[in-house]
Amino acid sequence: MNSSADMSSSVVLEEEIDKDYEPTEVEVNEYAEWLGMDLENDKDLLWIAKAGLKAPLPEPWKPCSQEEGEVFYFNFETGESVWDHPCDEYHRRLYQKERCKKYGLPFDDEEEVEQAGKSLGLAPAKGVADDGDSLDNSLSNNLGGSGSASAGAMSTGSGDEKKKRKKDKKRQKVEKGKEGFG
């Protein structure tokens, strides 16, 4: 989906933020795999997946729904629309950066990742270290944490099935609005 999508039959949804929301271990693991993590070797980087699940939509993005109930995201300033949460790619790249850092591998896009985080309002806190307790650390303490990951191949898992579960979770996190497009 891109800005060429037919918006006439779409409904703007309101994101409902539960400040007490803590993703389950299953949700974190599923999202981590969707990001490309190897769960056996990347346990110390699960904070990235947790942060991704808790990331609010940056302004001016809004969740929207088509007639079929599919949730997508629309940027009201640029007209861009995407299927995945606008912060997903940032968390995928942050994982790749942290993975490379652990193994001393080159990562050419470090500045790009930091700029993307800043533009989404997700800039990592400088100088904050991850204490290794990946699922119990708070989001704010872990966005800047240093971690590690596998130097092996990233797993892709069953993409369609994971994407469907992720979309179902997105649908549960939003409440239908009354305002439509066009």
Image: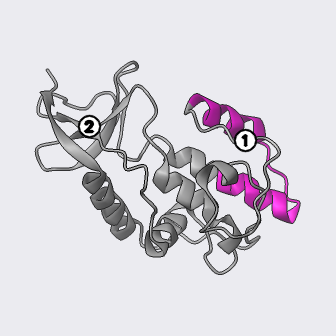
> Dominant secondary structure of the magenta stretch?
helix
Q: Position of residue 10 (x, y in %)?
A: 16, 34
Mark sitting on residue 91: none
The 10 Å Cα crowd at callout 1, few under 14, some 14 to 19, many 20 or more, is few
Image mark count: 2
Q: Position of residue 163 (x, y in %)?
A: 36, 61
Q: Which residue is mark 1?
A: 125
Residue positioned 56% across, 54% down in the render:
51
Which amino acid, by three-letter code, is at mark 1? Ala
Residue positioned 19% across, 30% down in the render:
6
Residue 127, compared with residue 8, is above or below; it is: below
In which quadrant is the N terminus drawn?
Answer: top left
| Residue closest to the eye, 88 or 158 | 88
The 10 Å Cα crowd at callout 2, few under 14, some 14 to 19, many 20 or more, is some
Q: Secondary structure at mark 1?
A: loop
Q: Which residues are magenta?
A: 94-119
Residue positioned 61% across, 76% down in the render:
39
Q: Secondary structure at mark 2?
A: strand
Q: Report whether 31 appears left or right of 44.
A: left
Does the magenta segment cover residue 80? Answer: no
Q: Which residue is mark 2?
A: 14
Which amino acid, by three-letter code, is at mark 2? Glu
Mark 1 or mark 2: whose residue is earlier in sequence: 2
Toward the right, the furthest residue is 104
Q: Position of residue 156 (x, y in %)?
A: 52, 69
Quadrant in the rendering for residue 81: top left
